[in-house]
Image (spheres, rainbow, N blue to C red):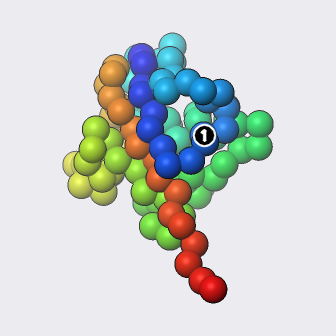
């Protein structure tokens, strides 16, 4: 299964690739984010253990242009071959 990745930051572990291939026939958005984290030299905590949602102050994730929260199953939504996951890191405010 091939998943395309878009982001507003350099995703560690992708090394100038815009997609990731998996041997698995299916996975959820949550599992995808966990696998992406494992690919990074320093793991990134996209999803906190036990959480059913992402911290909106940290991350925005869309599946094919739709915010994951609007998908029927949220982070449990199954990905399909060719899907595009967009990961955005939220800018910190302050002075």
Residue found 41% across the figure and 43% down from its top: 86
Residue found 50% across the figure and 17% down from its top: 21
Residue found 60% across the figure and 27% down from its top: 16
**82 sits left or right of 58 in the view:** left
Mark 1 residue element: loop
Q: Which residue is most to the right? A: 41
Within-10-Å neighbours for mark 1: few <14, some 14–19, many 20+: some
Horizontal and vertical percent position of residue 61: 41, 50
Q: Nearer the viewer, residue 38 or 57?
A: 57
Q: Which residue is most to the bottom? A: 95
**52 sits left or right of 58 in the view:** left
**80 sits left or right of 47 in the view:** left
Q: Quadrant of residue 91?
A: bottom right
Question: With respect to residue 38, does 52 lie above or below?
Answer: below
Question: With respect to residue 48, does 71 lie above or below?
Answer: above
Question: With respect to residue 57, does 59 lie above or below?
Answer: above
Q: Quadrant of residue 29?
A: top left
Horizontal and vertical percent position of residue 5: 45, 33
Quadrant location, the C terminus: bottom right
Residue found 33% across the figure and 22% down from its top: 82
Q: Which residue is most to the top? A: 23
Read off the residue under disc 1.
11
Quadrant location, the N terminus: top left
Can residue 67 be seen by looking at this rendering?
yes
Horizontal and vertical percent position of residue 74: 33, 51
Q: Nearer the viewer, residue 73 or 70?
A: 70
Q: Which residue is most to the front? A: 95
Can residue 55 be seen by looking at this rendering?
no
Question: With respect to residue 62, does 28 lie above or below?
Answer: above
- Number of marks in picture: 1
């Amino acid at each position: 299964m091939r998943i395309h990745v878009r982001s507003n930051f350099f995703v560690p572990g992708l090394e100038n690739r815009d997609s990731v291939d998996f041997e698995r026939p299916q996975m959820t958005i949550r599992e995808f984010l966990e696998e992406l984290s494992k690919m990074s030299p320093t793991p990134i905590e996209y999803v906190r253990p036990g959480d059913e949602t992402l911290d909106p102050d940290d991350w925005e994730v869309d599946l094919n242009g739709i915010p994951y929260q609007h998908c029927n199953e949220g982070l449990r939504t199954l990905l399909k071959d060719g899907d595009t996951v967009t990961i955005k890191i939220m800018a910190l405010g302050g002075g």
